[in-house]
Image: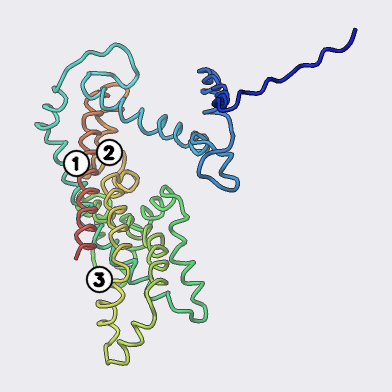
Amino acid sequence: MPAVRAVRTLPAAGAPAPAPAAPAQPSPPSRLRRALKAVTPGPAPDAGGAAIYRRWWLPWLWMLPAIVGAAAFGVFPFLNTLLLSFTDAKPLGGASAFVGLDNYTRMLGDSDFWLATRNSVLYAVIVVPLMVVLPLLLAVLVEKNLPGIGFFRSAFYTPVLASSVVVGLSWQWLLADQGLVNTWLRKAHVIREAIPFLSDSWLILLSAMGLTLWKGLGWYMIFYLAALGNVPKELHEAASVDGAGAVRRFWHITVPGVRQSMMLVGTLTGIGSLRVFTEIYMLGGSTGGPGGADRTLPFYIRDVGLDPLSGNAGYGSAVSVALFVLTLGLTLLAQRLTKEDDES
């Protein structure tokens, strides 16, 4: 048979040409495909380089271990403490009952709580200003590159590396009635009887403050050394040419140049002062001084909340919440002062 050839008919003269067929619209992707596209690596819009293969969840994936750790060891304990403060839970567990605000009412009428609060606040009021100023003076002394200055920097930093327990035992030996300090003062005929550093309530508290200062000087000295490196040397040279002495240059150039670091040191020291425990325990004993007169808030929380026989975890949690509020207030105050300083 002869092959049949398709004949294409041409439109008649003057007839309009047929419109081209519209392209077929692609069907929308299914929900499963959209979900897979959202979570699988692939080109991202408005991105270049390696970032085109990066998805929104990838940074969160790298942060996941830190987030889990913060939630497990920070957020959950805080919420659990807040809930326990409304119960009469025991330290070793067991049945507990909801008591509402009874723990907070008891706390407000507890003279021991207010004594511990006074000691903690007094500790912060005395230690914070000294810890802000003394490491700065120390950093100014060791800032210059003089022969052998590295030895002094290392010597000042050495107490930071020592354990708090070891340092406390050393101070016990130094401040005991037959210790090094009293022995030297007797031989120098300055005193006749031993100074009761470890038996008088006020001297125990002051000795603990001295221990905190001695151990923290080297640590905050490093903060100030880093800040002093950012103060332009030209300002000191110009002020020196104009006849400004060392004290005047310190107040008008050094202090304004490290003001942010001073605020940071004050905040960190204030938080640490409100949480002090080891120094009081090592110098005042397990009772926190004679009759518990030197107990701070962490010390008081241990006594009332963690004692396995007579402790009340609910009441201890309420005191912990009070300590948190006090610490938060100090932090917000420091931020407010920093903000006002920046605006001025």
Front label number (1 vs 3): 1
Residue 179 pos. (x, y %): 36, 58
Relative placement, left or right, of 56 versus 191 is right
Residue pushed farthest right? 1
SS assignment at label 2? helix
Q: Nearer the viewer, residue 85 or 182?
A: 85
**Type of amino acid at the residue the image marks with label 2:** Phe
SS assignment at label 3? loop
Quarter location, residue 14:
top right
Relative placement, left or right, of 77 versus 190 is right
Q: Which residue does the image show at 42% across and 66% down from the upper left?
A: 226
Q: Which residue does the image show at 43% across and 66% down from the upper left?
A: 156
Residue pushed farthest left? 109
Q: Earlier in the sequence, mark 2 or mark 3?
A: 3
Residue 103 to residue 248: above or below: above
Q: Could you say which disc has been placed on residue 299 in the image?
A: 2
Q: Could you say which disc has been placed on residue 116 in the image?
A: 1
Q: Earlier in the sequence, mark 1 or mark 2?
A: 1
Q: Residues within 10 Å of mark 1 (few under 14, many from 20)?
A: many
Front label number (2 vs 3): 2
The span from disc 2 to disc 3 (Cα, nearest Å) is 35 Å
Residue 64 pos. (x, y %): 49, 34
Residue for badge 3: 190
**Type of amino acid at the residue the image marks with label 1:** Ala
